Amino acid sequence: MPAFANMVLKDHADADVTFVPRDITNGVATAVSSTGVPVGEKTASWATSKTSTGRRKVTLKLVIPVVQDVVVAGISRPTMVRAAYADVTVTFEGTSTTTERQDMRKALIAFVSNAAQIQPLIEDLAAPF
């Protein structure tokens, strides 16, 4: 089992965004990147489980909120106005090998990083053609 430790991701400007372990509840690990205001915390979570058919399932989730100060009755307070969500589920047969799982992880990295096909879908909300 990997150690539950800080995880560094990158933002659009290639700047480090550090996620710090928050907790593990019911087998789901959660880490947050916070500026001190809970409503604006970026959240990453991950878990593994076994399906009823004996497959192994890995679930990854990422939430990146957008926070703005909203003035109500003369009082300014940070408010989440929207968020971006990512949900990735990878399922393996119970007989899968380490090499097969490594191949899937590397393929996912390349798939999401594909500038010609996938980048326009995510960044420009372009339809595939």
Image (cartoon, rainbow, N blue to C red):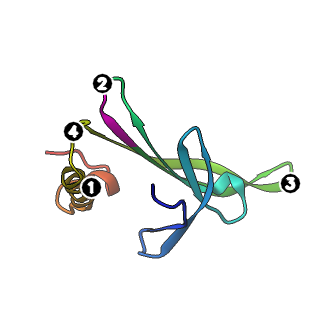
Pointer 3 local density, CA inside 10 Å: few below 14, some 14–19, many at least 20:
few
Nearest the viewer among 47 and 81 is 47
Extreme right residue here? 74
Answer left or right for 103 relative to 86: left
Instruction: Characterize the magenta stretch by its predominant secondary structure.
Output: strand
Q: Earlier in the sequence, mark 1 or mark 3?
A: 3
Q: Nearer the viewer, mark 2 or mark 1?
A: 2
Gap in angstroms between the C-alphas marked 2 and 3: 57 Å
Gap in angstroms between the C-alphas marked 1 and 3: 50 Å
Residue with the mark numbered 3:
74
Q: Earlier in the sequence, mark 2 or mark 3?
A: 2
Residue with the mark numbered 4:
95
Give the answer, above or below, for where 95 lies relative to 52: below
Q: Position of residue 127 (x, y in %)?
A: 23, 45
Q: Nearer the viewer, mark 2 or mark 3?
A: 2
Q: In the image, which disc is placed on residue 53?
A: 2
Residue with the mark numbered 1:
105
The residue located at (41%, 75%) in the rendering is 14
CB contact under 8 Å: marks 2 and 3 = no
